[in-house]
Image (spheres, rainbow, N blue to C red):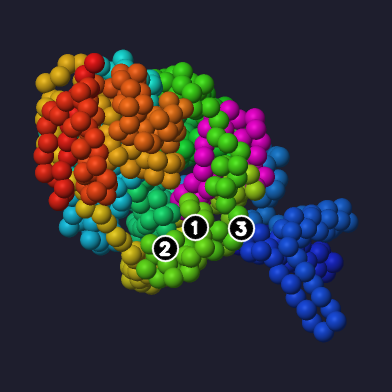
Amino acid sequence: MTDRSGGARPRLPRLAIVADGLATLFIMAGIAVGLTDGFDLAVGRLHLAMHAAWRPFFWAAIVLALRNWRIPNPPSFSWLVPSGAVQWVMDRSAAPLPLEEVALFGGGRSPQKRATEFVLLLLFFAALVVALTWPQALHMADALPDRGDPLFSIWRIAWVAHQIVRDPIHLFDGNIFYPERLTLTYSDSLLLPALISAPFFWLGLPPVLIYNVMLLGAFAASGMATFYFVRALTGRTDAALVSGVVFAFYPYRYEHYPHLELQMTMWAPLALWALHRTMARSQMRDGILTGVAFACQALSSMYYGMFLSLYTLVVGGVLWLGHGRPRGALKALAAGACVAVVLTAPMSAAYLANRSMVGSRWLGTVALYSAEGPDFLKPHFRSAWYGRWAEGGHPERQLFPRIAPVALAATGFLPPLSVSRIGYLLGLVLTVDGSLGLNGAIYPPLYYFGSPFRGLRVPARFSIFTGMTLAILAGLGLARWLARSRFPCTIAAVLIAATAIEAIPHMTFEEVWRQPPHIYDSLDRLSPPAVVAEFPMPTDPVSYPIDARYIYFSTFHWYRLVNGNSGHFPASYEELTKREADFPSVAAIQYLKQRGVQYFTVHGAFMDRDRYQSIVMELAARGDVQLVASAPWEGSESRLYRLTQ
């Protein structure tokens, strides 16, 4: 009996085969129970029930322990990998596993060919993005998925562009939630995407256009980064293209279509590429590039920065063992870690300074956003093919990966395995379990003992790395298959088409104002910027997103705002909304003065007509309120008032 690499294998005793098979059945049952609510099976008088996923895994462990005690050689499941697959972990002299790093250091392409390839690749992914987000391309400057989180993201990137050239020392002191400080740290600050988009704000392009270009560009950039990384591993363009499409249009992206920071995944594949290079030749340059790519990911999305740190620890550990435990690689990665710390230090310092304000996420909230097994079978409502089964899914926990990504990734599970495949198989286990949050094995100790993880609200967001891992495994598996095929380009084209067709979404958009009401023109010349309150205010946490439109308006004038919208709401804001519930009462107006408010607005378009007329009449009868400006807007009227003593 021989393995696929030509090495001789000892023949398995029949008892070992039976035990391995029984353990496999237990493991499959555990996975099935974990992904569902379990099952009840009745056959005649026989009744079988299974609702706890740990039980079949427990029995699998018992069977494997007994089997390997009685028959230690060869160990269980040794047929999955080439001979010597276990020994290389413990014995440096053992025959090494294949690394599957075919083209880590380039394929000898000239600069002209690389530039041409880059342009063609960009056009390819841009065309797919336009097609699979249609009709977004028709409304780039005036439509968004909704008027909540996208408007908040526009404020974040616009604020950085505004403040970085005026007062960078106070970059994190956003103009919302006045008089609170460090308000940019109430959510992910989106620093790197903001800096990339800043020149377009300085040129005066429409904010909604800039946002949409960044959003759709993240789809394309993530696909391109995955392409380059997988081709570095496999040396095959066809397999890498399939991988890029899988990751660029993974269903998670449509679930989080309104969240700009959660589309910023292009740096993770580049960090892995640099990590492979560091392990392969232990050069300081590659270690530093790993640190730079990691820092770019953290500066683009804090969630992904923390998740990537765990992911690279697991995958990097396997690569380090597979390359013979090179000490030089550890030194290079240590240098890269130092670079990453320096690059992220300003952001980290701001968040640490505001830790007492933001605090830890409530355990109940983290539990709510921790995935459960059935969530991996629940599609998102934006899916054109599977959206009909989305009813009843939890927000941010509709994690069905679709059929094509899983089927393509399955080709990477087939033996013989390599160092890279083992690393990414373990990475897949990490990401799925991490998505389970407090329901999994990895996340609870991270929450209780890992301080930065206590600030994360949604562990299920770990599943984007599940998508990236599926894409990588798909590329590794397809490369082997396509190398043996007579028509590799045709097969790759069919697989890309199948993946793209399954990814077709059902998209809806809301029109967004290109300009705010003209009443704000009266605030342009005030220095320092005026302190403004906007009405109507939200009346409860469910209606807090209404303030997203006000902070969007502020990007045109940058007045200081007592309103605000973010991932965290300070106590002062909650008190504000309670005290202004009966606006414009005497007590409500007096409280505005106590908060330092100089001006306030009333927008008839955002409230009932009779309510608006009643407010206007009450304000007209007051002696401490002066009408500054009024302007028709959205079929109604907006007014700006000044508070007098």
Q: Which secondary structure, mark 3?
A: helix
Residue 131 spot, x, y in % from top left:
25, 62
Res 339 quadrant in image: top left
Amino acid identity at mark 3? Gly
Q: Which mark is residue 398?
A: 1
Amino acid identity at mark 2? Phe
What crowding class fits label 3: few (fewer than 14 Cα within 10 Å), some (14-19), or many (20 or more)?
Answer: many
What crowding class fits label 1: few (fewer than 14 Cα within 10 Å), some (14-19), or many (20 or more)?
Answer: many
From the image, tell me which residue sits under label 2: 381
- Vertical arrangement, residue 22 with respect to residue 351, above or below: below
From the image, tell me which residue sits under label 3: 373
- Vertical arrangement, residue 67 with respect to residue 446, above or below: below
The one of 338 and 640 positioned closer to us in this rendering: 640
> In the picture, which quadrant includes the C terminus?
top left
Residue 353 spot, x, y in % from top left:
46, 18
Of callouts 2 and 3, the N-terminal one: 3
Q: Which callout, 2 or 3, points to the residue nearer the camera?
A: 2
**In the displayed image of the protein, which residue is found farthest to the front?**
621
Amino acid identity at mark 1? Gln
| Gap between marks 2 and 3 measured at Cα | 19 Å
Q: Which secondary structure, mark 2?
A: loop
Q: Which segment is the magenta one?
A: 440-468
Relative side of 93 to 507, left or right: right
Labelled pair 1, 2 in contact (Cβ < 8 Å) = yes
Instruction: Residue 287: tell me if it is visible.
Output: yes
| Gap between marks 3 and 1 measured at Cα | 11 Å
Of callouts 1 and 2, the N-terminal one: 2
The one of 645 and 12 positioned closer to us in this rendering: 645
Relative side of 412 to 613, left or right: right
Which residue is located at x 44 percent, y 70 percent?
388
Labelled pair 3, 1 in contact (Cβ < 8 Å) = no
